[in-house]
Amino acid sequence: MPIKNIAVIGAGTMGNGIAHVFAQNHFLVNLVDVSQPQLDKAVTVIKKNLDRQIAKNSITEEEKAKTVNNISTFTSIAEGLKNVDLIIEAATEDLDLKLKIFKEMDQHAPADCILASNTSSISITKIASATQRPSKVIGMHFMNPVPVMKLVEIINGYSTEKKVSKTIFELSSQIGKIPCEVNDYPGFIANRILMPMINEAIFSLYEGVAGVAEIDTVMKLGMAHPMGPLQLADFIGLDVCHAILKVLHEGFGNPKYAPCPLLTNMVNANNWGVKTGEGFYKYAPGNKDLVVSERFK
C-alpha cells in the first residue's frame, strides 16, 4: 500500500508538527483547517522550527525550502483530501468532533485511503464506527514536539486490517520514528501509564504531602525523569490531562482513574498550564526559569 500524498486535518501544535515531519521526509502534505489564520500560523511555526534545525546544522536552507514547498494549505476538507493516500486527523481531543471529522473524511477521501487519528486516548474502534471503512482506520499517536520525539504509538482498532497496520508501521520508520504497535483499550499504553502517574502527583499536592517543586524534583532526581510530572502536565495541558483521565475512568469504570478534584478545579478555572500562562507553574514570555504558581507557594 504505497503512501505518497498525505493530508493532515488540524493545524494546531500536533498537526503542524506532523505536517513538518512528513514534508521534511519528501511527502506532499495537504494541511487542512477551517481557520486560514490558524493555517498561516502553522506554516510560520514550521518555518521557525526548520530555522532551529538549520541553526543546529541538521538541515540546510535548501532542505528548508523543499520542506515548505511540500506543504499546501486548505480550508476545504473536500479540496484538501483529493488524491491522498493517508489522512491523519489531529484535531482537539473531543469524541464528538472526531466522529464528525471522520465521517467527512470517509465521504471525501479516495476509496483506498487509510484514515488515521492522532488521538492520545479515544477509542479507534469507536472513531472507525463513523466510517464505511473501519478496516482502514488506525491510530497514529505522535508525541509532542513531533519533530523531536521519536515514538509513534500505532493503535489497531477492532477491525483494522493487518496490511494497514504493516503499512503504517513501515511508514513510521520511513519518517525516522520508532513505531510501537498496541491494541485499542482506553489510554492505549502511553497514557494508561503516564496519566495515573500525573494524577497521583496532583493528589500528592492536593493532600499536602509535598509542594510543586518538591514533587517534580523527587521524580527528576530520584527517577531520572527529564521533566517532573506537574511540569509535564502543564506542558501537555491540564485540560488534555483531565480529558484523558475521564476517558480512562469511563472506559474501565475504575475509580483509580478519576481525575483529582484539584485538577478539575484548575481546568474549570482555565488554568491549563503553558497554553494559558499558568498551571502548577507561572509562564511569562521570555522567562526560562520555572516559577511555581503563587497559589501553590
Image: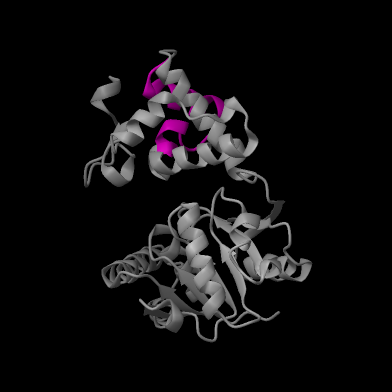
Q: Nearer the viewer, residue 154 or 290?
A: 154
Q: Is residue 6 visible?
A: yes
Q: Quadrant location of residue 3?
A: bottom right
Q: Is residue 113 above or below residue 265?
A: below
Q: Nearer the viewer, residue 18 or 64?
A: 18
Q: Nearer the viewer, residue 158 or 58?
A: 158
Q: Quadrant location of residue 234?
A: top left
What is the tally of numbered marks visible in this picture? 0
* Quadrant location of the C terminus in the rendered image: top left
Residue at 32 percent of width and 35 percent of height: 268
Q: Is residue 35 above or below residue 73?
A: above
Residue at 39 percent of width and 58 percent of height: 13
Q: Is residue 271 above or below residue 119?
A: above
Q: Is residue 26 visible?
A: no
Residue at the extreme right of the image, as rendered: 162
Please tell me whether residue 230 belongs to the stretch shown in magenta: yes
